[in-house]
Amino acid sequence: MNKEPLFWLQYSILMLDSQDFVAAENFLATAYARANASPGFQTFQIDTHALRLFLLIEEKAAETPTVTHFESIMEKLDVVISMVGEESHRPYALRVLTYIEPFIRARLSAAWLDGKKCLIGSSGTPDTYATTPPGRHSLFERCQGYVGKRGTFQKEYFDWELGVPKLTN
């Protein structure tokens, strides 16, 4: 059981629910290590939890000017957004993407403006991304790119006011 990645994932989830972010990150790292040691193991569940964990950590640290987990958030966003295009993974991906809105709202400081632009684009709408850092695509562009490969991007998946994915009924 000690070698099972999902065993350690469950501990990370428990620690997150207990607001023990340090322990949650440690158990998450163990889950990834066990997954890497298991050939062919798919990390979808670990990836969605990792994104949720990093977003919640940074939302709670709103008083700090630096988003410590920014690169990890962007990396996991790529993975999770790619799941939106897969029907079997879509509900889980959309559910975890709802954590982006509170994270962005908590981090809307001028000190973090470049990061916000990187996530949602310079205007918060899909038409202008002139100030998005080079080599980066906004969250909308990422969603559109992945889902667009399988058909038209569905507007109802996106909150146009804030520029983040949302769950729909």
Image (cartoon, grey):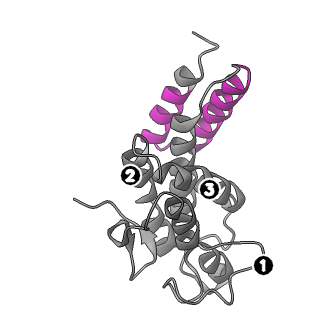
Which residue occupies 60% across, 23% down? 5
Per the image, label 2 sits on a secondary structure element best described as: helix
The residue that label 2 is drawn on is 95
Tell me: residue 164, above or below residue 94.
below
The residue that label 3 is drawn on is 78
Q: Earlier in the sequence, mark 1 or mark 2?
A: 2
Tell me residue 6's x, y (percent). Answer: 53, 24
Q: Residue furthest left?
A: 169
Which residue occupies 66% across, 72% down? 137
Per the image, label 3 sits on a secondary structure element best described as: helix
Q: Earlier in the sequence, mark 2 or mark 3?
A: 3
Residue 109, located in which quarter of the rendered image?
Answer: bottom right
Which residue occupies 50% across, 55% down? 56
Tell me: residue 15, above or below residue 124.
above
Mark identifier at residue 134: 1
Q: Earlier in the sequence, mark 1 or mark 3?
A: 3
Residue type pointed to by label 3: Asp
Mark identifier at residue 18: none
Q: Which is more toward the observer, 47 or 88?
A: 88
Tell me residue 11's x, y (percent). Answer: 51, 27
**Residue 140 falls left or right of residue 135:** left
Tell me: residue 67, above or below residue 48.
below
Tell me residue 126's x, y (percent). Answer: 51, 83
| Magenta region, main secondary structure | helix
Residue type pointed to by label 1: Pro
From the image, state whether disc 2 or disc 3 is nearer to you. Answer: 3
What is the distance, in whole Å, between disc 1 and disc 3 at their CAs?
Answer: 16 Å
